């Protein structure tokens, strides 16, 4: 299936303007850990996608959004709520860490 992609042109509307929490996966073609993380995020989307948006953004093609969100390395995952990044994870993280962050956001 794959995550829905956002771009610099759509980031503000689809992520910052979303009424629901949004998990953003920042990635690039050359990033092997990014490719390893993708199936984990897709699995989380299958579990939580009815309550939260899941998107990805290619930082090579869309560097502005990554720079504005102070993404310094890949992979980076951010959870947004109310137009603000409320959690940021740099580097590969286990599914349990991401799942706990999602659940904390959905059930504060």
Image (cartoon, rainbow, N blue to C red):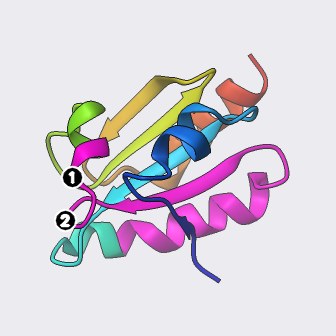
User: Which residue is situated farthest in the bottom direction here?
Assistant: 1
- Please tell me which residue is depicted at 24% across the width and 69% down the height of the picture: 28
Answer with left or right where residue 24 lies relative to residue 4.
Answer: left
Image spot of residue 47 (x, y percent): 77, 58
**Marker disc for residue 60:** 2
Residue stretch in magenta:
36-65
Q: Quadrant of residue 16?
A: top right
Residue closer to the observer: 40 or 9 = 9
Answer with left or right where residue 47 lies relative to residue 97.
Answer: right
- The answer to whether mark 2 and mark 1 are in CB contact below 8 A is yes
- Please tell me which residue is depicted at 26% across the width and 32% down the height of the picture: 68
Image spot of residue 100 (x, y percent): 60, 35
Specify the quadrant that holds the C terminus: top right
Residue closer to the observer: 82 or 47 = 82
**Marker disc for residue 46:** none
Residue closer to the observer: 62 or 102 = 62
Q: Is residue 34 magenta?
A: no
- Please tell me which residue is depicted at 51% across the width and 74% down the height of the picture: 39
Q: Pointer 1: what residue?
A: 63
Image spot of residue 5 (x, y percent): 50, 66
């Amino acid at each position: 299936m794959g995550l829905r992609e956002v771009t610099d042109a759509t980031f503000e509307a689809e992520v910052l303007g979303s009424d629901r929490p949004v998990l953003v996966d920042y990635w690039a073609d050359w990033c092997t850990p990014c490719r390893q993380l993708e199936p984990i995020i897709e699995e989380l989307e299958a579990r939580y996608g009815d309550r939260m948006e899941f998107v990805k953004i290619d930082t090579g093609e869309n560097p502005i959004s990554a720079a504005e969100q102070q993404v310094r390395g890949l992979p980076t995952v951010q959870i947004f709520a109310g137009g603000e990044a409320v959690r940021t994870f740099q580097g590969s993280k286990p599914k349990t860490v991401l799942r706990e962050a999602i659940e904390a956001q959905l059930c504060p």
